[in-house]
């Protein structure tokens, strides 16, 4: 597949790394020659320095025979025009654009992206994706990572195992025997920095970070088995009143439970805008790192703090200060993945990587097969892939144990109709089923082959 990626920033670079590693023909376009040089020096990609929306630049990038364009520059308007030029001048069949401005995303104006207007096939909103990720972290406070699958009927849970976890040193095979009715599978384990797909005889140890794929009704039981207590979050302090913070606060207001939020925003104009856009949420104008303003927000009695400003260091320091003041849980928005190892030593319970959420959204529309959802794990070390099994797939009609999955692949669950089923060796995979697979990055091409369908579905 020939792909043009506009924008060599964090998202563009990560998508280019992913797709080029899977033997796709990738060309990266950016107006900054240094970013282009960095990409061509470290990745197996071609690079073009120039404005991504200019027809001559796209022509040099090979737009005349490109299968897809992914416009992920930092300017919405450049992304929109790049897709328009790719369609009108070069007839590129698939166009994906990252758009940040919320007014472009209003359902009132959805006709804007029709083929005869502004032909964008998929619009990705990083702010909305990040806000949704934040809400999922709040819903599962005992986890360091979580994502919903199968129409909300299943969840991927990232769990750090403590020394008092009751199932340490127990082979995974034995866990199935001890808890036969538990609809949950350990699909991934990170130990001493290495992520792998465990085998039935593997044991779990203290300080392991594990990924568990569980039926939504069994999430609390799974957390309890792995030594985590679940507590309902009711008092939330949000530091940062931009699009992400405002999106989370609005979502919390729309809920019928008792969850309530307070927002702290340093910029007066933004704080006033947030106050006007919210009904029951208290908005405080001040610095989220100022202890006086934190105490005014009753941080010592808060169940969670969510630091989502546009500055990583502010988010990390504000989260640390909130925990020291007595807040029970801290979640920080961190763009720089090299800061992730600091989260544990600083006692930050979970972090959200906007790049990973955006990359996951884009990959869902790039993968071969009828892929319904993708979630990128770690520094793109693995993916959780949800896809529908069609009759052309080599999986259709086989028992789970008959499929020769690569070593880095585990089945998390199957959904038959509306019923989520725990996978066993004797379970038959049928056309129409939805399958969830944990896949290490090196095995993604082979999984794509297993999920392959006719070109009509691509």
Image (cartoon, rainbow, N blue to C red):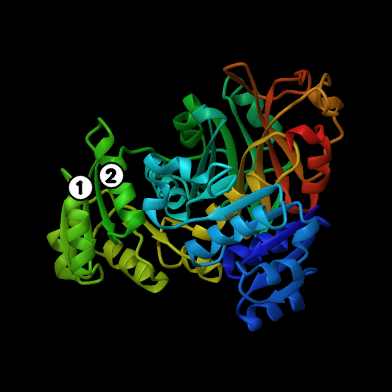
Q: Position of residue 133 (x, y in %)?
A: 45, 48
Residue 428, above or below 247: above
User: In the rendered image, which quarter is residue 114 located in?
Assistant: top right
| Camera-side residue of 222 and 44 | 44
Q: Position of residue 92 (x, y in %)?
A: 71, 52
- Quarter of the image with the C terminus is top right
Q: Earlier in the sequence, mark 2 or mark 1?
A: 2
Circle on res. 278: 1
Q: Are marks 2 and 1 in contact (CB under 8 Å)?
A: yes
SS at mark 2 in the image: helix
- Quadrant of residue 315 within the rendered picture: bottom left
Picture layout, residue 81 above or below residue 384: below
Q: Which mark is residue 250?
A: 2
Which residue is most to the bottom? 34
Residue 257 horizontal/vertical position (percent):
25, 32
Residue 353 visible in the displayed image: no
Residue 107 lies left or right of residue 428; in this view the side is left
Q: Is residue 125 above or below residue 406?
A: below
Q: Residue at x 49, y 66 (%)?
A: 75
Disc 1, SS: loop
Q: Is residue 22 visible?
A: yes
In the displayed structure image, the side of residue 432 where residue 244 appears, left or right: left
x and y percentages locating residue 398 in the rendered image? 84, 21
Residue for point 20% across, 66% down:
269
User: Residue at the location (22% across, 35% down)?
Assistant: 258
Q: Left of 150 or right of it: where is 321?
A: left
Along the line of sight, the residue nearer the viewer: 53 or 152? 53
- Give the quarter of the image for residue 403: top right
Label 1 Cα neighbours within 10 Å, binned few <14 / some 14-19 / many ≥20: some
């Amino acid at each position: 597949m020939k792909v043009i990626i506009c924008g060599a920033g964090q998202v563009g670079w990560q998508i280019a790394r992913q797709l080029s590693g899977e033997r796709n023909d990738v060309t990266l376009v950016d107006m900054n020659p240094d970013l282009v040089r960095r990409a061509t020096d470290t990745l197996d990609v071609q690079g073009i320095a120039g404005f991504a929306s200019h027809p001559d630049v796209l022509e040099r990038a090979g737009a005349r025979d490109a299968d897809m364009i992914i416009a992920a520059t930092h300017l919405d308007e450049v992304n929109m025009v790049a897709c328009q030029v790719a369609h009108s001048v070069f007839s590129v069949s698939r166009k994906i654009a990252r758009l940040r401005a919320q007014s472009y995303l209003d359902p009132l104006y959805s006709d804007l992206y029709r083929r005869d207007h502004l032909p964008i096939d998929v619009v990705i909103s990083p702010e909305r994706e990040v806000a949704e990720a934040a809400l999922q972290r709040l819903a599962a406070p005992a986890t360091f990572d979580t994502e919903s699958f199968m129409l909300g009927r299943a969840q991927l849970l990232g769990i750090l195992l403590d020394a008092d976890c009751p199932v340490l040193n127990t082979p995974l095979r034995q866990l199935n025997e001890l808890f036969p009715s538990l609809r949950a599978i350990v699909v991934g384990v990170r130990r001493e920095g290495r992520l792998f797909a465990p085998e039935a005889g593997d044991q779990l140890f203290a300080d392991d970070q594990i990924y568990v794929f569980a039926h939504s009704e069994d999430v609390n039981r799974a957390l309890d088995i792995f030594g985590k207590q679940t507590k309902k979050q009711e008092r939330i302090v949000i530091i940062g009143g931009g699009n992400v913070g405002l999106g989370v606060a609005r979502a919390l207001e729309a809920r019928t439970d008792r969850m309530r939020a307070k927002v702290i925003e340093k910029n007066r104009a933004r704080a006033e805008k947030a106050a006007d856009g919210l009904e029951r949420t208290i908005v405080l104008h001040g610095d989220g790192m100022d202890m006086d303003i934190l105490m005014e927000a009753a941080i010592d009695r808060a169940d969670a703090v969510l630091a989502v400003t546009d500055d990583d260091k502010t988010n990390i320091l504000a989260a640390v200060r909130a925990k020291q003041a007595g807040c029970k849980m801290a979640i920080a928005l961190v763009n720089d993945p090299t800061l992730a190892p600091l989260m544990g030593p600083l006692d930050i319970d979970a972090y959200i990587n906007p790049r990973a959420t955006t990359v996951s959204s884009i990959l869902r529309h790039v993968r071969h097969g009828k892929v319904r959802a993708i979630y990128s794990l770690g520094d793109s070390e693995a993916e959780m892939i949800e896809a529908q099994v069609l009759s052309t797939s080599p999986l259709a009609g086989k028992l789970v144990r008959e499929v020769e999955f690569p070593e880095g692949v585990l089945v998390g669950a199957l959904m038959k109709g509306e019923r989520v089923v725990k996978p066993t060796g004797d379970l038959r995979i049928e056309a129409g089923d939805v399958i969830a697979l944990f896949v290490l990055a090196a095995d993604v091409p082979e999984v794509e082959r297993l999920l392959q369908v006719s070109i009509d579905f691509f």
